[in-house]
Image (cartoon, rainbow, N blue to C red):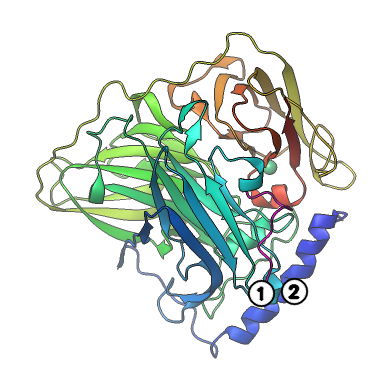
Amino acid sequence: MIRPSPARRALLASIVLVGASLASAVAPPAEAVTVVPFSRPLSIPKVLTGPNITLTARLADVQILPGAKTRMWTYNGTFPGPTIRRPTGQTTTVTLVNNLPPEAGDLTLHNHGNHSTPENDGQPDDRLAANGGGQVTYTYTGTEAGGNERGATQWYHDHRMGLTGRNVWMGLAGMYIIDDPADPQTLPKGAFDVPLMLTDRTFDANNQIRYNPAGNVGLTGNRILVNGVPQPYFVVGDRKYRLRILNASNSRSYTLALSNGQAFTQIGTESGLLPAPVKRTEIEIAPAERVDVVIDFAKKLGQKIVLQNVAASGSLGQLMQFRVMRDLTDNSSIPSKLRALPTLDATSAVTRTFVLSRSRTTGQWLINGLAYDPDRIDAAPRLGTTETWIFKNGSSSNHVIHLHDVDQQLVSRNGVPARPWERMKESWNLAIGETIVLKVKFTDNLGKFVFHCHILEHEDDAMMAQMEVVP
Ligand SMILES: [Cu+2]
């Protein structure tokens, strides 16, 4: 039996309430639905581009499966939430309004991957948007280390202490893209630059979802959604498309491959463009990771190509279908050099080691033997210095380590130099027994930030730690 942490106890109490609210909301019993693969078009979330954005968290009935709509916790009534798309170097405010029912409690919004000050980072217990119409405005400057923040595919999601898994599962997630004129401008753009959010959910016979993680191992769903649609099709032209793929699932990892054996050209990660494109036929993507890829459908007119998840079989292995049906001229290209990485100090001021483990007595997930304590500082790097951070996975599960505030460069994984597609990121999958060595430079922002496992049931089980950047 797992002894619940305080966060866990709050979560368990809330599950009952969520279940109750959904039970009262569902329609009379309907037949369990069958999804015909590739029978519905891909949905592209609405794009918000203005400098002052409002995200209202509210209930909405969303058409996910055929038949009854699914009651979800949404931003602005859709799942995924709207895609925010902003030029780097320009200030953006995002105002979170909490109009969810009382059982949702207070909320916080984390812009995942952004270089935010602590007060704008959407911390688990600070500056909460109170239930019943409370508002919090977050300000993002779009600047970093004396210049503009790098172009990147980020995302925003709830980050409430002990309740992130529930809140994201119920629908509180969307994408946030920073456009950067310093990135090559010949890459596919406009309608050929497409965000894809992967999530998994389990639906009941009435097409409703409910958050019941049954312990702290990690919740997976029995159906995979791409931009909120089960197994969609997407009509494309015979040209290159840029796909910004986000794994917004609570705990499921995917291994992406194309059914015709064609390679993806990976051009970016969570932290923006790679130094150079890399061809890969299989790409593993763990929770919170993003891969920015180009698929070239040239000479494929008339073909149907499936984006597969070769980590699973059946419907879980068939994510979406590209139908190459439009004869188009391709004016895009992928330069051989994309974007150099920032230069970090050659020497590190400090080396810190963090071991990921699980308590033998309580089953709780731990970092350096400890559960999260908001009153404890686990690392205090000095502003402007570069440090070496080592993460070792000593547990019997994979974990996805996510550091807030700054990008990280990979020195080595299991003693081997970084592979070209993971030299700079901010969410790192560690398989059992793996060790990564990161270099991290702390710029601009003083104060406290969390770092944690992004398997949300592990995070909510207090697999989180805190750093404080000091003068
Ligand atoms: Cu974990």
Secondary structure of the residue carrying numbered label 1: loop
Q: Which callout, 1 or 2, points at the residue further toward the start of the chain?
A: 2
Q: Nearer the viewer, residue 419 or 254?
A: 419
The spot of residue 102 in percent (x, y) is 70, 75
Q: Residue furthest right?
A: 361
Is residue 128 part of the magenta span, yes or no? yes
Query: Residue reaching furthest top?
Result: 346
Where residue 60 appears, as percent x and y from the top left, is 50, 75
Residue 386 on image: x %, y %? 63, 18
Residue beneath the point at 70% across and 13% down: 349
With 164 as the anchor, is 81 left or right in this view?
A: left
Q: Mark 2 sits on what residue?
A: 16
- Label 2: state its secondary structure: helix
Does residue 249 appear anywhere in the picture? no
The quarter of the image holding the C terminus is: top right
Q: Amino acid at mark 1?
A: Gly
The dot on residue 243 is none
Q: Nearer the viewer, residue 319 or 89?
A: 89
Mark 2 neighbour density, 10 Å: few (under 14) some (14–19) many (20 or more): some
Q: Label 2 sits on what residue type?
A: Val
**Separation of residues labelled 1 and 2 (CA atoms):** 20 Å
Is 388 magenta? The answer is: no
Whether residue 82 is visible here, answered yes or no, is yes
The region drawn magenta spans 121-131
Question: Which numbered disc, 1 or 2, marks the residue closer to the eye?
Answer: 1
In the picture, residue 37 is in which quadrant?
Answer: bottom left
Residue shown at 69%/59% (left/top)?
128
Checking the image for residue 132, the label placed there is 1
Depth order, front residue of 261/291 = 291
